[in-house]
Structures are given as structure tokens and as C-alpha cells.
Amino acid sequence: MSCFLVEWVKEPKTYSVVPCESLVDGTLRSKSKNLIGESHDLRFGKRVYSGTILAIGDASPLSLKADQLAQDAASEIEQTCSKKAEDGPKAVRLKRNKKSCMAEERARDIREILGNVAECSTSPVQNNSQLQINIGENNPTPEVSTIDYEEKYRTLKQKYKNLKIRHRELRNSGAGLDEVEIYPGTGVKITVGEMTSIKMVSHQPTVLARNLFRRFFSTEELSTHSLLGKTCNANRDSASLPAIDNIRRDAIMNCVLKSEGVENPPDNCTRAEAKLWSKKKRALKREVTKSLSDFMREEYRKARRGPGINNI
């Protein structure tokens, strides 16, 4: 059976012996003797590759020839590698010679500078002082700005102590015992000192809402009720908890909105400003509602786990 000796196009110096029937173009099989030196598509295994046809003949002699070509290619690669290894030290020596020349030039420059310095040392003192002044003008001393972090830490620490003392005084003093409504018209009252104390320790509106819930609702109320009495989508089949007292709940939420300045729109505002205000109010109310729902869900889970697990 006639075969081709092929050198693959994408893998030079790689040779294979394939049958003539491997030609993809069947019309060329009858003209196989005229294909030597040309590149054609050949089937090799289950894929098609492009290869240059080097010879045509029987499989055995072509296999021997392919082995010889592979050995010649390997010898050529070894010679190339050995030549590169021989050229390497020469390149290193050239680099070293270049470095030595640069070192000699630098030493010569240093000697010239030292000679100039010696001449300057014999000149009058006035010239020397003038030289120092010129050097100082050319190389001004940079000003280094330092921050006293210890002083800053002490200031913040003292500020924290003062706030803590003020918080304790407001809770224990009798000056703030007058009760006021947390939101007008709701009848939900709290002392001025206690309200001020809660606002001081609440750095976010969601924290303020949770602290007010702890103040106006007992632990039993928080663990046996939900915020709005709605059914959760994840537990739609289970019965929902009753809604907590809506008067105190709405009073607390309106108090939080009022403290953030989004209770009522500003006077003489444009339509665009009113739209932005309404958007801000809805976003804040949504955030507070979600925080309170999560808070009451946590209290419900704590009550179900029991007091022993909560203390772990």
C-alpha cells in the first residue's frame, strides 16, 4: 500500500508516515506522485492536519527515512544549544569589561572632584562660606510635617469620657424628669433626660428605633408579636404573629423620621426638591421597618431557644 512521508506544517521537524487514502481531497489521490513538496490536508486519527508531502512509497522504507530525519533534527537542536552555551560566557565577559570601564571612568571623576575640593580648601574662608550658601540655596532642607497622634488620641479619649459622664448625669439627674411626647398627638411619653440619653447612644436611625422599642415594649411583647402582623413569604402556610401595638409603633417610627428631618417637606420647595425629599423619606422608612422586623424576629428566636442558650 502506498504511503506518504509527511512533515507537519504546525509542528516543523515532526515526521509521520500516513497512507495515501489520508488525503482529504479524493481527486488528488490519482495524482499522488505529483504532490511531492506540496502541502495538503491529511486525516491523522480523527482529525485533519496540514502537512508537506516529502516522499511516496512503501511504509517500511518511509518509516526508516522518517526516523533518520528525526535524528538529524535532534542533532541540529543539540548543536544549536551547545553553540548558545559557548556564546554565553563571551557575552558575560563583554558585560564585565563594560562595567570595569565604567568603574574606571567613575574613579577618574572622583579624583578630579577631590582635586577641586583640595583647591577650594586653600582659598579664602569667604569663598568657602559663599560656596556653603550656594549649596544651601540649591538644596533647601525639606520641611517635615509631623502629626502628634498621641495628642489626638488624648483629645478623643477625653471627649469620650465627657460624653459618658454627661450621659450618666442625664440618666441619674432629676432635671430631666418632665415627660414629653416622643411624637405630638400620640400620648406616648418619656422623660426628657431618658430621651436625650437614648439619642446620644444611637448613632444611626435604625439603632434609635431599636432602642426606643426596647424602652416602650417588654421582652414578652417583642417575642410574641410581629411588627406589622403580616405573613412571611417563606412561611406562608404557618400562622402569622399578631401585630404589636400600632400606636406606640407608629409613634416611634415617626419620631425617628422627625429626628432625621424628613417628617415634612421644607417650605417653598420646588417640585424636584419635593420629589427628592419624598424619595429620601420612603427609603429611610423602608430601612427602619426592615431593621425593626429583623429585631423582633431575633427576639422571637431568643425566646424559643430559652434563657440558658442565650447566656452561652
Image (cartoon, rainbow, N blue to C red):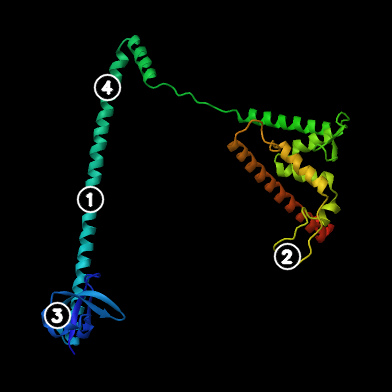
At a point 27% along the width and 20% down the height, the residue shown is: 116
Q: Judge by depth and name the residue closer to the eye, 9 or 69.
A: 9
Instruction: Return the mark for residue 91.
Output: 1
Q: Amino acid at mark 3?
A: Ala
Instruction: Return the mark for residue 55.
Output: 3
Q: Amino acid at mark 4?
A: Gly
> Which residue does the numbered mark 4 point to in the structure image?
115
Earlier-in-chain disc, 1 versus 2: 1
Earlier-in-chain disc, 4 versus 3: 3
Residue 160, percent from left and from top: 72, 33
> Which residue does the numbered mark 2 point to in the structure image?
236
| Residue 131 position (above or below residue 59) | above
Instruction: Return the mark for residue 270.
Output: none
Where disc 4 sits, the SS reads helix
At a point 23% along the width and 42% down the height, the residue shown is: 98
How far apart are the alpha carbons under marks 2 and 3? Answer: 80 Å
Spot the residue most to the bottom. Answer: 1
